[in-house]
Image: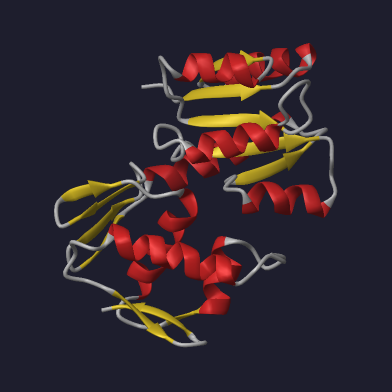
Amino acid sequence: MKKCIFAVDDEENIRELYGVALKSAGFDCFCFVDGDSLFAALKNDKPDLILLDIMLDGADGYSILQKLKDSPATRNIPVIMVSAKGEEISKVKGLNMGANDYIAKPFGVLELVARINANLRKTDTYSALSYSDVNIDEGKHSVTVADKTVTLTLKEYELLKLLVINAPNLVSRETMINTVWGENYLGETRTLDIHIASLRKALSESSASINTVRGVGYFLK
């Protein structure tokens, strides 16, 4: 079965390039001029990967990415950000917001196809993670606690995954912030505590609990 790629770009020549190159590479490809047309299509179909340009008329790629990652229905779809902006800050911002990869224009068709295939392979090898009665399905980007599905934000999901992978060992505050928010995060460290508090509520019916080593970090027990 062919993998399906959605691509968002307001430049007609780039959309035509996607259509020809990706179909030649064996993908089904559907192109959209903006976020509105993308989300309209997502109501009826879910692609295996989304190519998302940053510089768009109207809502930019960052705001579209945020909306994708905020929705349980689309947050697990891999996203490759595409932009002529080659500055490191643009790449870092997209990755910190949940993008899976970044490619700068102009790009070669072979590089584009290789990046897509690499990210699809990662999706295909997602595994199930568990600790006690907490279960994480990375492929579906879903979490169950005591056999009940719980809804988490993207940041809560990433924090829980970090705790489960390392359980029952401690994960330092620094590691959590760097992994989930990025090494260049300049916000309040209190943000971490707020997310942990929300996670504790989500795990309220679990036999596992999040324990605190004050000023150092957290661990699941």
Whether residue 107 sits left or right of residue 183 in the image: it is right
Question: Foreground residue, 214 or 183?
Answer: 214
Relative image position of residue 136 (x, y in whole percent): 29, 54
Question: Foreground residue, 2 or 142?
Answer: 142
Q: Can residue 32 be seen in this view?
A: yes
- Describe the colour scheme in one phrase: secondary structure
- Quadrant into which the N terminus falls: top left
Relative image position of residue 65 (x, y in whole percent): 60, 36
**In the picture, residue 220 is in which quadrant?**
bottom left
Q: Is residue 82 above or below residue 184?
A: above
Query: Going 23% across and 46% down the picture, which residue do you hit?
Result: 149
Whether residue 177 sits left or right of residue 81 in the image: it is left
Query: Going 37% across and 75% down the picture, which residue do you hit?
Result: 166
Q: Is residue 137 above or below residue 172?
A: above
Question: Foreground residue, 188 or 3?
Answer: 188
Query: Going 71% across and 26% down the picture, which residue do you hit?
Result: 59
Whether residue 84 sits left or right of residue 63 in the image: it is right
Number of numbered discs overlaid on the protein picture: 0
**In the picture, residue 210 is in which quadrant?**
bottom left
**In the picture, residue 46 is in which quadrant?**
top left
Q: Is residue 144 above or below residue 62?
A: below
Relative image position of residue 212 (x, y in whole percent): 39, 82
Relative image position of residue 18 (x, y in whole percent): 66, 20
Q: Is residue 17 above or below residue 121?
A: above
- Quadrant into which the C terminus falls: bottom left
Question: Foreground residue, 33 or 194?
Answer: 194
Query: Going 70% across and 16% down the picture, which residue do you hit?
Result: 15
Q: Is residue 114 visible?
A: no
